[in-house]
Amino acid sequence: MPLLRLTDAVPTVDPNEIVEQVKNITASSIFAAVITAVVSILVIRVLLSFLDRALSRTKIDAPLRKLIHTLLRAGLIFLALILVLRALGIDVTSLVAVLSVIGLAFSLAMQNFLSNVAGGMQIFASQPFKIGDWVEVGDIVGCVTGIDMFYTKINTLDNRVMNLPNSVIVTQTICNRNTEPFRQLEFRPTTSYDAPVELVLDTLRAIACGDPRVLTDRGIFVHVSNYGDSAIEYVLRMWCKNEDYWDIYFDVMDSLKPTFDAAGIEITYPHLNVHIAENAAPNLSVPTREGKK
């Protein structure tokens, strides 16, 4: 079965037929077309004004409101043009078909562009993040510094500006670290089996309570989490304000080993203990070729 080409779908327009229709335009049809144009303009203005007032009462961002306004305005103008041509007595069936095919070809050629616009509309509508939020999008972590209909700008920790297409962002898992006002920190230090469990628990609890930025009213979780091959693993969880998260995290990491050293607690690392039995006579006999020892 032969493939259908885009040009095969374009209807044939007879120029002579259009010329004949233009010649048949009368004064009454011109008057009707003028009235249709005036009424159409008034209706378009009223509808767009009503749309703007309705959108202004929503939480939709300004760029998305502007895009919706532009798209609706273009559609209404196209509809008004069709009505005016029909009032003049011109057959617009072939014209609409031609414009539809042209629109299809344009949309195929601008597929990436339109997908970015659709992604931008989705971002503005769902608002998974806003300017100033700290986000993770795939493998990229940084602060959102700009959002438009085509790209989202993210400034990374090493001060690189990443312009991500909106069509890519909406297909990724987005982690927004600024959505909630509070965050929980978690630490999992390991100690030697020789360190008393209660001493370790009290030391970890003192580290958490000693920082005034820690929200002790939300609770501090300190427990043994695992007995490993050569170490005991503990877990420390505490709450803080979102903006204090990284400062507390690095302060605790900086103070953890000195505090453990001062308390006589050994922080373990992967190692292997080899025990040699005493008073065990080694067997040094070597078999000979004849099998005798």
Image: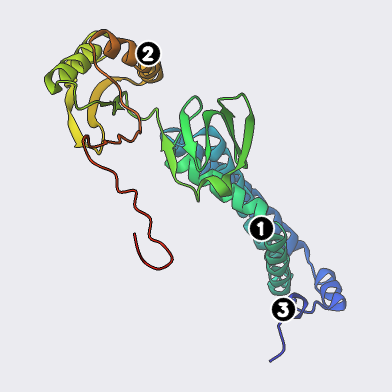
Q: Is residue 102 left or right of residue 203?
A: right
- Which image quarter holds the C terminus? bottom left
* Of labels 1 and 2, the one closer to you: 2
Q: Which residue is mark 3?
A: 9
Q: Hey, which quadrant is residue 201 in on the image?
A: top left
The residue at the far bottom in this view is: 1
For marks 3 and 2 on the same chain, the one whose residue lies earlier in the sequence: 3
The amino acid pointed to by label 2 is Asp
Q: Residues within 10 Å of mark 1 (few under 14, many from 20)?
A: few
Residue 56 in sight from this viewpoint: yes
Q: Hey, which quadrant is residue 269 in on the image?
A: top left
- Looking at the rendered structure, the secondary structure element under dot 2 is helix
> Is 103 situated above or below 137?
below
Q: Hey, which quadrant is residue 265 in on the image?
A: top left
The amino acid pointed to by label 3 is Ala
Q: Residues within 10 Å of mark 2 (few under 14, many from 20)?
A: few
Q: Which residue is mark 2?
A: 251
Q: Position of residue 272 (x, y in %)?
A: 33, 36
Q: Is residue 78 left or right of residue 245?
A: right
> Is 91 situated above or below 76?
below
Q: Which residue is mark 1?
A: 111
